[in-house]
Amino acid sequence: MPICHQCGKDNPNQAFCGDCGSALALKDYISEKIQEQISARDSSIAETDSAIKVFERVLGWVKTVAWIVAIPIAIVGALGIWKVSDFWSAVNGAQRSVTDLSTTAKDQMQSAAQKASFEVQGNGQPVQASHGNEPDRGEERVSVAS
């Protein structure tokens, strides 16, 4: 009378246990248990392998995207540094130009003021500005630049 290796029940003239359904032949029982363990391990290994493959694929895409983004940023950054230096050079040049122009204008205004002052002191009369539309009567006139 075969005894079930799984549950320990007696099973007369049967190939499988009447209580638990397990194979009564020791060879069949061992094969079944080994298949269960292998399938459990295979599914665990398959899940791990799948997770590793997904991670590697995602990592590859992240690296690719990082290179695609990093190269233009590096190029723009390098050009940006040059452009910023060009900008500041232009600002400094404009500042020098404005300073020179204002100095020249100040000198011209002082010169015109001195000339007008000399003319007023020389005649004792204030000098009238000529605008170009009055007829010349022989008087000295000072043109005022606007």
Image (cartoon, helix red, strand yellow):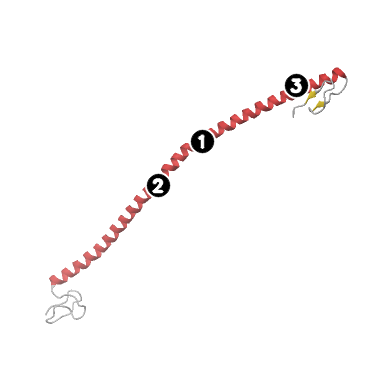
Foreground label between 2 and 1: 1
Q: CA distance from mark 3 to mark 1?
A: 42 Å
> In terms of depth relative to the viewer, which is nearer, 73 or 97?
97
The quadrant in which residue 131 appears is: top right
Q: Quadrant of residue 106?
A: top right
Q: Neighbour class for label 1 at 10 Å: few (<14), some, many (≥20)? A: few
Kindly identify which residue carries mark 3.
111
- Residue 36 image offset from top left, x and y in percent: 22, 68
- Report the amino acid beneath label 3: Ser
Quadrant of the snapshot with the N terminus: bottom left
Nearer-N-terminus badge (3/1): 1
Residue sitting at 66 percent across and 27 percent down? 101
* Secondary structure beneath label 1: helix
Give the percent coordinates (x, y) of residue 86. Answer: 53, 33
Report helix, strand or loop for mark 3.
helix
Give the label on residue 109, or none: none
Observer-side mark, 3 or 2, equals: 3
Amino acid beneath label 1: Lys
Amino acid type of the residue tagged 2 in the rendering? Ala
| Residue toward you, 85 or 30 | 85
Q: Earlier in the sequence, mark 3 or mark 2?
A: 2
Closer to the observer: label 3 or label 1? 3
Pick the front one: 57 or 32: 57
Which residue is rendered at x = 61% and y = 31% of the image? Answer: 94
| Residue at the outermost front position | 135
Q: Which residue position is annotated with label 1?
A: 83
Q: Residue at x 44, y 40 (%)?
A: 74
Residue 82 in the image, given as x and y percentages of width and height: 49, 34
What is the distance, in whole Å, between disc 2 and disc 1 at their CAs?
Answer: 25 Å
Drawn side of residue 143 relative to residue 124, left or right: left
Q: Which residue is mark 2?
A: 66
Quarter of the image containing the C terminus?
A: top right
